[in-house]
Image: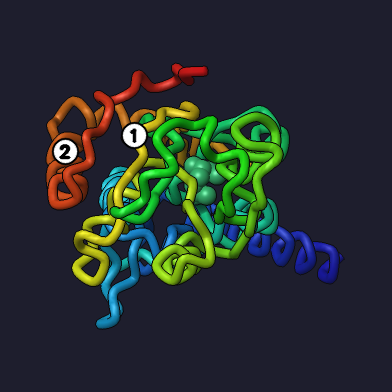
Amino acid sequence: MKTLKASVAAAAALALALSVAACGEGGDGDAGSKITIGIKYDQPGLGLKTPDGKYTGFDVDVATYIAKELGYEPGDIEWKEAKSADRETLLQRGDVDFIAASYSINDERAKKVDFAGPYLLAHQDVLIRADDTTITKPEDLSDKRLCSVTGSTSAQNVKAEIAPEAQLQEYGGYSECLTGLENRVIDALTTDDSILAGYAAQEQFKGKFKLGGFKLSNENYGIGVQKGSDLTEKINTALEKMVQDGSWESYVQKNFGPANYKNEPAPKIGVVVD
Ligand code: GLU
């Protein structure tokens, strides 16, 4: 009898411990708990890890705002690099609580993860050398050497519709394409205009590159969460508030202003533009 009582008590204690742990993990921001957020590390203006170990960009500001609404202070955030091809896996494995990394909402990804948002509408474009006169319209891309990133919608769109005939070099991150563009090993880097504007404005590339100005696709940026997570709704509430209280606009100006990126107005939460 005594043993049974003891084991019942132990089970109850264990259940309590588990629920407390789950609560901390679940994002109610108990004192001392942390939240892990996936971002890009090499996209100036969106997600950038600076040489002195700071994190900057629109996605970083949006993620910090969401974390705050979920009960986490900036000091409670652990940033993790989320490369394009790794995003679904990071979420499925529970390595991150959510992802804010120029992450377009699409059907294929939505089979594996859930999305809150959208919180930004971007368009696929090309970054070319400033002296290039051979690429003036999307059709010109067909016989060119293009560069993009594995696991991105940008690479998929090139293969499926934009320029299936073109040579496509795929790297792990967009920044890896820049040297090739500079050295004339590739003719165009293609991805979202929001990302390309950030590269073009970087001090070391000033005057070297230009954007094509082609709106090749609609990229609706969402916040990725684990499938079935109760964070989706909470994050949508946070995003609505972020737009309403003017934070969205101030993050846009702060992060896209220097790159002269002309962004679209704030999207309506729950409305994905095809
Ligand atoms: N927004 C596109 C995507 O989610 C391209 C940018 C990126 O690779 O992060 O694939």
Total labels: the figure holds 2
Residue 136 horizontal/vertical position (percent): 40, 35
Tell whether label 2 touches label 1 (CB within 8 Å). no
- Nearer to us: label 1 or label 2: 1
Quadrant assignment, res 43:
bottom left
> For the point 27% across and 26% down, which residue is it?
264
In the image, 168 versus 233, the foreground residue is 168
> For the point 59% across and 64% down, which residue is it?
172
In the image, taking residue 85 as reference, residue 233 lies left or right, namely: left
Q: In which quarter of the image is the N terminus?
A: bottom right
In the image, 267 versus 165, the foreground residue is 165
Q: What's the image's color scheme?
A: rainbow
Residue 8 horizontal/vertical position (percent): 76, 60
Q: Is residue 56 visible?
A: yes
Residue 206 horizontal/vertical position (percent): 20, 63
> For the point 19% across and 68% down, which residue is it?
203
* Mark earlier in primary sequence (1, 2): 1
In the image, 274 versus 227, the foreground residue is 274
Q: Residue furthest bottom?
A: 52
Q: What element carries label 2?
A: helix
According to the picture, the residue beneath numbered tag 2 turns out to be 247
Categorize mark 1 by other alpha carbons within 10 Å: few (<14), some (14-19), many (20+).
Answer: some
Q: Indicate the amino acid at tag 2.
A: Ser
Quadrant assignment, res 69:
top left
**Mark 2: C-beta under 8 Å from nearest atom of ligand 1:** no
Whether residue 33 is situated above or below residue 116 in the rendered picture? below
* Numbered mark located on residue 213 in the image: 1
Q: What element carries label 1?
A: loop
Q: Can residue 80 be seen in this view?
A: no
* Numbered mark located on residue 252 in the image: none
Quadrant assignment, res 242:
top left
Q: Indicate the amino acid at tag 1.
A: Gly
